[in-house]
Structures are given as structure tokens and as C-alpha cells.
Amino acid sequence: MCPINDHGDAKFTNFHVSPTTGPRKTKFILDCSFVTKNGTGTGMLTLTLIYPNKQSAATDFLLEAQKPGSYIERIPIDVIEPNCDPSRGLCDDWPVGTYNVTAEICNGECGSHHPHSATYDMGKASFTVTK
């Protein structure tokens, strides 16, 4: 059973993408480091990426319960098709334009109305893919 901490907290201390602009094949890094004064319960980090064409993709990361302290979370964003083989044809590169990233760090499940679930903090950032 996962530990419950209804008095937990977490606040993003850094929330940005580096670099903010780069050509295709750039490895962007999302820094979503956070601090907690009371510790956290078991929860999740939910990332939503809005593409220039307004399509979106989301992914969830499990966050185990943490003691009070600072935590570094850096997530790579590779803007190249992972199974790309140019010898077999054109690769489906990420479209040029601005990408918006939103993250929620939560106790329990993000967006849930179940007991012991709550959003600790939310962050927003963006990066631009050039040719």
C-alpha cells in the first residue's frame, strides 16, 4: 500500500525548457525540479505537450512519496522520431513552431476527485523548434 500524506506539499522551484529554441534533432530538457516542506504522498507528475498544430500528447510519471527536501527532475524531450531510419524514407520530424508544456505535480492521481488526491503545483513553459 502506498503511504498517504494529506498534509504534503510540493512547489516547482524551476520550471523551464532548455534551450528555449533549437533545430530539429535538438534534445530539449524540461527542468521541473521541486521542493517540499512537509514531504509528499505517493503521486504523479503529469506532462501535457501542445504541438504547433494544436494537437496534444500527455504522459504520467509515478512519484514515490518523498521526505521534506529539494528534488531535481529533468526530463529529456527529443524532437526526432525515435524509430526514424532515413534510408527507408522520410522521417516524421516534429513540426516547426512553438510547443507549450504544462505540468502538474500531484498527491495521488492528477485530476482525480478521489480522497487523498490533490494538485500541489502547476507549471507552464514553451520551446520552439526551428528547421
Image (tube, helix red, strand yellow):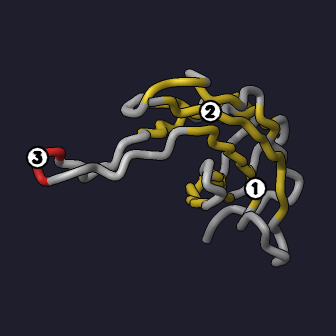
Q: Mark 3 points at which residue?
A: 87
What is the spatial separation of the Cα atoms under label 3 and label 2, in whole angstroms? Answer: 29 Å
Q: Can residue 47 be seen in this view?
A: no
Q: Residue at x 47, y 36 (%)?
A: 76
Q: Residue at x 78, y 68 (%)?
A: 111
Q: Mark 2 points at which residue?
A: 127
Q: Dot 2 surroundings within 10 Å: few (below 14), some, or many (20 or more)?
A: many
Q: In which quarter of the image is the C terminus?
A: top left
Q: Dot 3 surroundings within 10 Å: few (below 14), some, or many (20 or more)?
A: few
Expressed as whole percent of the image width and height from the top left, the position of residue 42 reads 67, 58
Q: Mark 1 points at which residue?
A: 106
Residue 3 occupies quadrant: bottom right
Expressed as whole percent of the image width and height from the top left, the position of residue 28 reads 50, 30
What amino acid type is highlighted by mark number 2? Phe
Choose between 63 and 92: the one closer to the eye. Answer: 92
What is the spatial separation of the Cα atoms under label 1 and label 2, in whole angstroms? Answer: 24 Å
What is the spatial separation of the Cα atoms under label 1 and label 3, in whole angstroms? Answer: 43 Å
- Vertical placement of residue 131 versus 102, above or below: above
Choose between 107 and 100: the one closer to the eye. Answer: 100
- Vertical placement of residue 129 versus 3, above or below: above
Q: Is residue 24 left or right of residue 29?
A: left
Residue 27 occupies quadrant: top left
Q: Which is more N-terminal, label 2 or label 3?
A: 3
Expressed as whole percent of the image width and height from the top left, the position of residue 26 reads 42, 28
- Vertical placement of residue 90 versus 42, above or below: above
Tell me whether circle 1 and circle 2 mark residues in contact (CB < 8 Å).
Answer: no
